[in-house]
Amino acid sequence: MGRKFYINSNIERLFALFGTLVLILILNIILANTLLKKIQNDAKLTFIQQCEDTVEDYTLALQTKLENIESEIDIIYAKLAYKTLSPESIQEVLVREKNNLSINFTEIVYSDTKGNTYNFYGENHSIADRPYFKIIMEGKTKFYVSRVLESKHNGEPIIVFARPLYDETNRITGVLCVGCPLETISSFIDEIKIGLNKKMSVRDLDGKFIKHYNNAWTNWTFHSGIKKPKNFKETEKIDSVMQTTDVDGNDVYVFYKEMENAPWTIGMTVSLSEFKKIDKKQKDYQNFVLEIIIVVLALIFLIEMWIHSFLERHQILSTHIDSVTHLWVRSYFEKEANKLLKRYPQSKFIMIEADIRGFKFINQNMGELKANQVLFQFSKILYETTKVFDGIISRGYADHFYVFIKITSVHKAMHIFKDALKKLDENLKQQDLPISPKFGLSFYIPKKMDSSITAQTLISRAHFAKDSIKENALQTFAIYDERLLKRSNEDNFIETHMENALKNREFFVMYQPKVDLNTDKVVGAEALVRWQSPVLGFMPPNSFIPLFERNNFVIKLDFYVYEEVFKFLRKSLDKGEPTVPVSVNMSRNHDKPDRFVHDFTNLLKKYDIPPRLVEVELLERSSMDKNVLREVTLMLQKEGFKVAMDDFGSGESSLNMLSTIPVNVLKFDRSFLFASDAKEGKLDATSENFIETLIDLGKNLKKETIFEGVETEEQRDFLRKIKCDQVQGYFYSKPLREEEFMEFLKKHR
């Protein structure tokens, strides 16, 4: 029987400690390996995400470039669209307009429906064999961008941009083709600056390079074996990624995305060595961490104390510092700002609140990571701009930032703020941040304020001022003052009294005559709503309509106006008095065509008014979807109403609108009459030419034309000369009440 081996308690504790340390070491190694593998994968995915984002951003930028080219082509298109011109006249237009373009188009060509072309060189070619000609003639697209083609004029490589031409019945009558040298397109693309040291290329469907990061390869076709990379996780943002060899024979990944508005593909070349660098860096880091773990476990007790101390300090820090921007959090900012107010009770201070327009869109569409990057970059620029004034700065909820600065005078502070605003804007452009901030300002002035004013009060006032800007893109900042408070109180009063005002018939309708320029007789009127408030007095529409559009009360007000107009027409018909068609406005809030037309026609039938006496005006700038506008137009016309497009020409896409929304009347905004630099109501040559082009466009499309806002005899005479049908404005009459309008109508029948 063998002897037993006994150990004393010290050795037992030593073995226990050693076993514990070994167990902890093994567990730490396992956990460290797992964690570091995840870090390595995350690093790869982050790099991939950055590549995908770069391709996405480059694609969007290139699409914008193509839209700029399309806008240039639209200048020529506007001269030819919806007109019946001879080939000679078309050629004259092409020669004349070429010099007005800012882009070097070497060819501007008109083609008839058979593919026979006319250009400003006097050459005739056939493009019937061109794929883009066939696609446009089949009506598949309204704007086409080609792959690399050979010019029929000089044999040079070009890109062709083409769009169909229509006659008054929307039938395709020909094709407008514009050729741009490949070299020009390549230089145009060179202007895009997305990321640093990124190898970007643009190919067409044949694999020919429209742009290559090595200019020597532009207009070359490069083919190499491609394959899907192994163990490569693609994300949803990029169409695809492939593994191939580049023009120098190196193994690379190509992240690519097909464009929506051109048969082109964007590609970014990334060397496989970039990914290997990540692997090597992470492996070195992993070995280093494992060595550190061993050292840490050897000094377990001291390190534990140090970790505890570090975590304790970190916890205190994290309660004061925002993790995304590294600025103070709002609660700590308020505490420090209140300290400054107590320390310097006789000093003046400015409180600034800032946020980013459209940040919710950035967050929803670009993801939290991109949104946080935007926040960090903006906070950095904001900090650099304001740190010279020895103030404090913090981040609040989401994209809200606060700055508190001690000042010597309000006037000087505003001067400095405006200068800082310019520097901030320049810094945003340098950082390539596509954001537009807005600001609210409030001031602490000790002589005008009591000692109970706190940082929280100043923040509330700055926030209130900032909110008053709403979505006005032209206004960058607002200052809290008594007038702002008064306006807020008025808005609040309007919202709390609008229902009773409608019941008490405080709203009333006025009628502005429409005059035929051929006869100087009244041929119609526009119904305009006004409000006579017992408290606020007489109010024009711009003081309450925008608010009603925001809270949707405008729908009720519209039908109130419709009924007042129908009552007026019914009364005139019953008395046998003269009547003319009255136009009423359809607000942008009516987004259900079926319901609107149903309720509108039922109300008309209630008063037995002939549809010929009612015209409905739509807004071209309406936020309503174009399909909804088309649907409601067709439904109203089916019921016998005329439909007018109000403020035509001041919207974003008038030409496209005309091809989709078949209105009867084009009503031009008064702003065209007052865009002239001439004095005393006269029009300069540029304004006259533009207005005449608009009227000619309406005539060619067989639309009635009417100009509003006519105030001078010179304006009236010019519009009569260019054969505008009707006008309305103070030159003939201001808006009139019912009785006044009837008297005016009887005198001008």
Image (cartoon, helix red, strand yellow):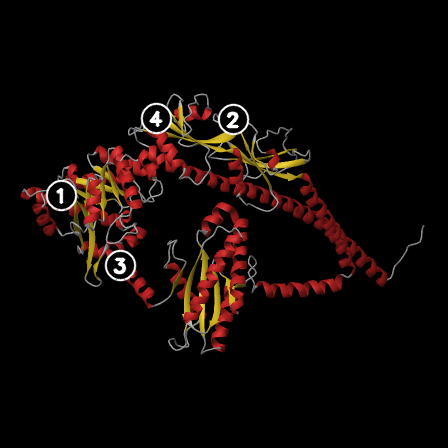
Count of all numbered marks drawn on residues in the image:
4
What is the three-letter code of the residue carrying label 4? Pro
Find disc 4 in the rendering and name its residue. Answer: 87
Proximity of marks 3 and 2: CB atoms separated by less than 8 Å? no
In the image, 391 versus 604, the foreground residue is 391
Name the residue rendered at 49%, 31% in the picture: 159
In space, the residues marked 3 and 2 are separated at their CA atoms by: 69 Å
What is the three-letter code of the residue carrying label 2? Gly
Q: Residue furthest left?
A: 575
Mark 2 surroundings within 10 Å by alpha-carbon count, few (fewer than 14), some (14 through 19), many (20 or more)? few
What is the three-letter code of the residue carrying label 1? Asp
Badge 4 element = helix
Q: Nearer the viewer, mark 4 or mark 3?
A: 4
Q: Is residue 447 above or below residue 193?
A: below
Mark nearer the N terminus (1 vs 2): 2
Q: Nearer the viewer, mark 1 or mark 2?
A: 2
Proximity of marks 2 and 4: CB atoms separated by less than 8 Å? no
User: Residue 155 bears which disc, if any?
Assistant: 2
Badge 2 element = loop
